[in-house]
Amino acid sequence: MASRKILVVQKYGGTSVGNIERIKAVAKRVARTADEGKGVVVVVSAMSGETDKLIALANGVSSSPPEREMDLLLSSGERITSALTAMALEELGKRAMAFTGRQVGIITDTLHTKAKIEKITAGRVKEAVKKGIIPVIAGFQGITETSDVTTLGRGGSDLTAVAVAAALKADACEIYTDVDGVYTTDPNIVPEARKLDRISYDEMLELASLGAKVLQTRSVELAKKYNVPLVVRSSFNYNPGTVVIKEDEEMEHVVVSGIAYDKNQAKITVMGVPDRPGIAARLFSSIAEADLVVDMIVQNVSSDGKATDISFTVPKTDSKKALNLTEKIVKGLNAKGVALRDDISKVSIIGVGMRTHSGVAAKMFATLAKHNINIIMISTSEIKVSCVIDAKYTELAVRALHDAFGLKKK
């Protein structure tokens, strides 16, 4: 009985397919993988800058472009890249075929601009692989049950790649970008940052959600759910990348694996809220109904039992919408007022080793204090500690914490 051919899904981001020369380079890499005897399925993003151009076109004709039409417009960027990449592969003598999200059978819910994948049929892709054809899939997109085009949000091509890999039961999903892998922190801030050989799904999930832009958060969640091995690599060289896999015992010996930061943060404080049951539920239910994502929440304990303050953070891009909504809600709560701060950032330490090591949070707080950095809010989980600080101290905090936890290159 013949052994099963190894199947790899390769996703190439916007910088990897940024122009015709880069698309040709990607085609050569894909062809090389096929020549190694592996089955290969390709997922591509739009060429770098293309999505922003399409958004600018929409804003040029409409002050408030309808989301349904925006999805149809924005999905065209990936379609262009998939067709060009398939052509480049054909030019190299490889049989290739471009597919849209619809043709792959990526079915999503009806939430335009940030749809969630509900299922993938992938019948045509499976058939193409069987025939030795290289499918080149337009990432970032799907369709609803009623055939409306949807998009999966920023970084959605990562999600497409992982979902396709899960549907095909691929042996690996390789995410190609412009960096060599996942680093202990942003090398632009800390030149001594070290590339990680491997990292657990949970650590990668925290890093992605806390500001690291290497992988889309939802793609890591899906990879963990279906146990899809991820590899983050550069498309500009052949260096080994970072493998994202299940946690093992060895990983627990490393207390902190990485430092993340996020400057896209704003803090809203509701002052003088009556201290009685149901107030927080009313406030955050209304915010949730508006599809606003709340991160950290702090409620001060009332000393007199009459009034308290509630602070929470939202992405800075949603801060005006959140502020307007909160002000409307507060009118019916007899609170004293609402305040917004958008000159903050969130700095986080992440590591599965925190579960079995004590004093990690204390060391973080002491390091920030040593550099006169005031902590505005604190949030913790089993494997992360996050602090909200003044945005102007972000780089200093990242460098100090990276040094304090010994994450520099050996």
Image (tube, rainbow, N blue to C red):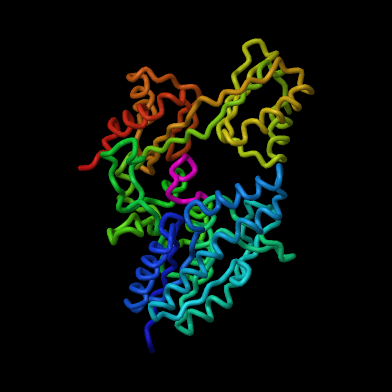
The front one of 100 and 245 is 100
| Quarter of the figure that contains the C terminus | top left
Q: In the visual, does 230 lie left or right of 125?
A: left
Left or right: where does residue 324 sit relative to residue 209? right
Up/down of 87 relative to 259, above or below: below
- Of all residues, the one furthest to the left in this rendering is 410
Residue 150 occupies quadrant: bottom right
Q: Given the current orientation, which residue lies at the most extreme bottom position?
A: 1
Q: Is residue 15 above or below residue 142?
A: above
Residue visible at 35% across and 72% down in the picture:
33
Report the side of 72 relative to 194 (left or right): right
* Residue 19, percent from left and from top: 43, 59
Q: Where is residue 364, by image quadrant?
A: top left
Tell me residue 156's x, y (percent): 54, 55
Total marks placed: 0
Q: Determine which quarter of the picture holds residue 291.
A: top right
Residue lying at the far front of the rendered structure: 60
Q: Quadrant of the N terminus?
A: bottom left
Most common secondary structure along the magenta stretch: loop
Residue 216 in the image: state x and y as whole percent. Answer: 49, 50
Q: Residue furthest right?
A: 332
Q: Nearer the viewer, residue 255 or 229?
A: 229
User: Could you tell me which residue is drawn at 43 percent across and 72 percent down?
Assistant: 88
Residue 257 image offset from top left, x and y in percent? 34, 42
- Give the residues in magenta: 208-217
The answer to whether residue 231 is left or right of residue 265 is left
Q: Residue at x 42, y 54 (%)?
A: 15
| In the depicted structure, whether residue 329 falls above or below residue 49 | above
Residue 209, magenta (yes or no): yes
